Image (cartoon, coloured by chain):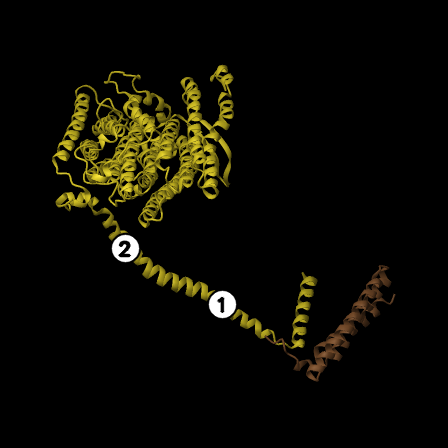
Amino acid sequence: MLDLLAAGPGQPGFLDLLQGALRPTIALIIGLPLLGFLLNGALSLWRPAAKGAVSVIGAGVLLTTFLVALQLFLQLSAVWHVKPDEVIRVTLWSWIPVGDLRVDFALQLDQLAMVMLLVVTGVGSLIHLFSVGYMKADEGYARYFAYLNLFVMFMLVLVLGASFPMMFIGWEGVGLCSYLLIGFWFSEPANADAGKKAFIVNRIGDFGFLLAMFLIWQATGSLSFAEVFDRAPQVLAAGGAMATAITLFLFLGCAGKSAQIPLYVWLPDAMAGPTPVSALIHAATMVTAGVYLVARTNVLFALAPTSQMVVAGVGALTALFAATIGLRQYDIKKVLAYSTVSQLGYMFLGVGTGAITAGVFHLVTHAFFKALLFLGAGSVIHSMHHAYHATHSHDDAQDMRNMGGLAKYMPVTAVLMGIATLAIAGIPPFAGFFSKDEILAFAFGRGAQQPAFYLFWGMGALAALLTAFYMARLMAMTFFGPNRTGEAERQHLHEAPWIMTGPLLVLGLLSLAGGWLNLPEFFPAIGAPHGVLHHWLEPVLEAGNRVAESVGLAPALSHGATEAFLVGGAILTAVLGLTLGWVVTRRAVAVPAHDAAPETGFWKVLYHKYYVDELYDWCIVRPLVAFSRVVLWKKVDQGVIDGGGVNGAAGLSRALGWIGSRLQSGQVNVYVVLFLVGAIYVLGMVAWR
Amino acid sequence: MLLGPSLAVSAILFTIGVAGVLLRRNAIVIFMCVELMLNAVNLTFVALSQAYGSSGQVFVFFVMTVAAAEAAVGLAIILSIYRHHKSVDLQQINLLRG
């Protein structure tokens, strides 16, 4: 490898040599988590009590994968420094060679995939470590780590896949692991139902992904990313029906996986899984796959401005809508779940605006601070659960009304959650400020070309206010004010062990400094130069930007007074939201959950999440179940399939058998006659043919 | 040499055999007709091997052996049918009717 670099990327055939040299490493990145899954799966079947071995394998493979990815990053950044356009493609084997269609089991690594690879393995490692402490007492410890390792493997296939079908394997695989982990405690029917809900809602999105793949194949005659993006600008008319259809179907897939309106309903229910799972799958990595898909197919989206408008609009609407629900939830994880839906909306606003870098930037910073928030909430729930367990109380360990004043008992968690709150609310210099501000600035900039984006910007800005509000409320209810846990329980509250606070500490640092990855021009260069991520992603986004320029919709930033207004406004909004949330929450009389008065007025609507679940239940689920019962079951299944198909086939063979049995007269002479006729017929055929 | 007439005789014998099998009802007679057909075939073998010098005569020994075995088994079956039904009229024996 070093010899190769010394020889210089300029020489001919360098890419081939490089790909050959990196082949084992890239296969290792997929293989290590798979190995972890197999070993932990075997242990969960035969030695479920061997928790020490499970921890070492489960967290060990992830840490190793992260180190391998880090080493790969160092090597490749040296190469990309000289030749930024080199994409590493490794074909492991041929998968579907049918006629014109050739799909290889191939992985590719470019700058965008590298960012995702580091986030998935890095944040993943921290969450695996946290899980060692969080799940320590669980019976299904080995099974948990087996699923978690499997998830990481599929997520890496999703990120590294070199074609749409490869990405789809990962896409479906992470969906499967999400289902398995949401329903991890499946003996509670509610948890199993939540898993099923996630799986079924995602099927709707996957249907869109599949249709998009068919259309892409029809339009470009290929499914590998390199060829599709190469041919798309020639074969697809900019703004044409085909480009719009492809991208809208792709976005349907994204809406399912990344929990956007109208398919967001599964994500809040997915909180039924263990909290580290919520942090890893339902906050940091899997749910951002949709954003990654849009970023990956930026060329196609640049060709379809209508779809971009839809993506940005749905994103902005989701950001605002979910944030309002978050205002009135009491389950600490539900607040964070709606916050995740809302932040994913921001990311889609970013990538829909064409500011792919901004969207991916928010994806990265969100992975840091939302993982921290979830793990912090996990630490709180862990402590609450222990306290209630010790006193055999049946109160809800996740209800914020039962908490209060926890900062005294868990100072480390409280401080780190505070950092994450500042990051998500958008206070500089914490991570969320830079990414959120960049998205809003680009949305405002595009407003000059398409005025609808001014509206989207307004919705995003309002959602930012609400974000700050509900986060301040969460902090105030959980960590401050009088403790409402109960006299006996109070003495059992304690800080989490170091294996849990350690990862929190690292994530806290990342939430603080993650935003410096892409410092804007107006900000003093602290710790890092300006626009690192922007330059890093440039080669990946080049083709898409060329297309965007040709249709006159290149992403643009405002400068001067407008910029100052936007930045100042963003900071003001965040401060205002935090203050309001703090004041309103601290003023309210805090009572434990079982003493709380029922909600009234609009709060009730928010508490019941706008009754969207009920609406879906009445408009879609019940009619579908009724239709299935009356028509599909009674008519089609019992009438046509059973009556016509099963019994019909039986009747037909019985009739034929009856005819055959008439020939079976038992008279030897008749048989001989038939035999003779047959023999003469055969001889005749032979003679006269 | 005498190939034509030999084959003609054999064909006539075979046809008589077939006609007997088809038309007669007595199991013993049918059995004899089957033997007649076998021997017609044997005649064909011998005639053709005489004309072309191949070893068809060997087959005749095979056929005779098999025919002997068949006669033994067949007669035993007919005997037990007779014990059971007190008749060897095949039209009355239709136990295998479907």
The amino acid pointed to by label 2 is: Arg
Closer-to-camera residue (A648/A244):
A648
Q: Colour of chain A?
A: yellow
- Figure chain in brown: B
Residue in view at x 16 percent, y 44 percent: A596
Residue A475 screen position, x and y as percent: 21, 32
Q: Nearer the viewer, residue A157 or B63?
A: A157
Query: Helix, strand, or loop for circle 1?
Result: helix
For badge 1, the amino acid type reads Leu
**A168 relative to A493 in the view: left or right:** right
Q: Secondary structure at mark 2?
A: helix
Quick check: A533 left or right of B68?
left
In the rendered image of this protein, does residue A9 appear above or below residue B88? Answer: above
> In the shown orientation, is residue A44 left or right of residue B54?
left
Q: Which residue is mark 2?
A: A622
Q: Is residue A325 visible?
A: no
- Residue depth check, mark 2 versus mark 1: number of the one nearer the observer: 2
